[in-house]
Image (tube, rainbow, N blue to C red):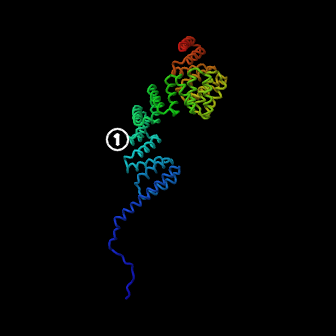
Amino acid sequence: MARSKHRATSSAPAARKPAGDAASAAHASDNRARIDFLKAVRHFNVGDLTGATRFLEEILKARPTDFDALHLLGVITARRGDADKGADLIRRALSVRPDDSTARNNLADLLLNQGRAADAVEVIKPALAASSPPTGLLFCYANAQRLLGAYSAAIDSYRATLMAAPTFVEAALNLTATLFHIGNFAEAERVVRETIERSPQVASLRLWHGSVLLEAGRAEDALHPLDQAASAGLVEARHKLGGAYFTLGRLDEAKRTLERAALDAPGNAAVRTELGIVLLALNADADAVRRLREAVARAPKNAEGHAHLAEALRRTGAVPEAIGHGEHATRLSPLLPVAWLNLGEALLDAARPQDARDALARALALDPNSAKAEQAYGTALEALGDHEAAQAAIERASAKS
């Protein structure tokens, strides 16, 4: 009887590959990953995020814990709009290499951009235990603390950053801004002056120098640095320069400067608001109406623009419209004294003294030192027949002038 044919199977163990073959395969895998990563970097550097992603994903299919691929893919993923997934990828990279300060810095920056300052602090803290923490992480930590309102901690970290890197201009600017915010103008000026000596070419330093001086009540001293920054093309510097001229009573120079700023920044509502205020001071009421209309058109929720437009309209006789803008300003910003003042004066012109009195009382409650509000309040009281109280208010106004 013929034997049936069948495929034989063997129970013998497979022969082992020589150790050298395993090492060779691992070396080849390393080489492929390295080549693919370099290709990904080249694509990334020319802005081809899709091409870079393709190579990085290929690496991770074979090597799921490849630090460089996880890190760069996380950065790219966040840049393409998926911040949460990008953060997760960078966290995975840090689980492979916890001491990498660049990945930690990138993760903290990503969290800060999401407004997650507390999470950024927790990411950075482990690296701060080192005797010499990386400068970038110190800076990032300072930024996070500043966003959290922990200004003292932010200032200390900015100073530590600058001790490690004295030419780190952005750290100096952020330190200046933080000191400015808490009202420490003397220290802010010292920091910005020292930084200008090290980096005289940075125009934004001149802007900050002038801004600090202006806020500190030194408008005359602010003119030179603001003019330098404006000459370098910074529109905000020209805006502040116009404000400095206005503070000094140099109204024609303020007008010319702000008109130039308005040309340089067609969409800037704040410049047009300030220009409108200057035009009111020059009694150019029709021009003020035009500029303030431009301001509120560009920023409909700009309470100050509506408040000053109410004044300009009142002066040109458009009282009902003035009242409308005044009321809108008080709704937008109930704590803005000029909104209540200008509404009150428009109500006086509309022969509504009781409503005017109420609005002007609000203005005085918010700004008790306003001679103009006190005078208008007296006028409202007089119209209501309260002659004694009106006389007292007018005397207070005279004392405040």
In the rendered image, the vertical position of residue 401 relative to residue 320, given as above or below: above
- Image-based side of 137 in relation to 11, left or right: right
- Image-based side of 304 in relation to 131, left or right: right
Q: Nearer the viewer, residue 323 or 338?
A: 338
Q: The residue under label 1 is which amino acid type? A: Ala
Q: Nearer the viewer, residue 216 or 172?
A: 172
Q: Residue farthest to the left? A: 12
Q: In the image, residue 154 lies at what x, y percent? A: 41, 34
Q: Residue farthest to the bottom? A: 1
Q: In the image, residue 78 lies at what x, y percent? A: 48, 47
- Total numbered labels: 1
Q: In the image, residue 230 lies at what x, y percent? A: 57, 30
* Quadrant housing residue 149: top left
Tell me the SS state at disc 1.
loop
* Quadrant housing residue 245: top right
In the rendered image, is residue 346 in sight? no
Q: Quadrant of the C terminus?
A: top right
Q: Which residue is mark 1?
A: 130
Using a 10 Å C-alpha cutoff, classify the residue at mark 1 as few (fewer than 14 neighbours), some (14 to 19) or many (20 or more): few
In the rendered image, the vertical position of residue 334 relative to residue 388, given as above or below: below
Q: Nearer the viewer, residue 233 or 320?
A: 233
- Image-based side of 99 in relation to 75, left or right: left
Q: Residue at x 44, y 47 (%)?
A: 87
In the rendered image, is residue 247 in sight? yes
* Quadrant housing residue 278: top right
Q: In the image, residue 63 lies at what x, y percent? A: 41, 57
Q: Quadrant of the N terminus?
A: bottom left
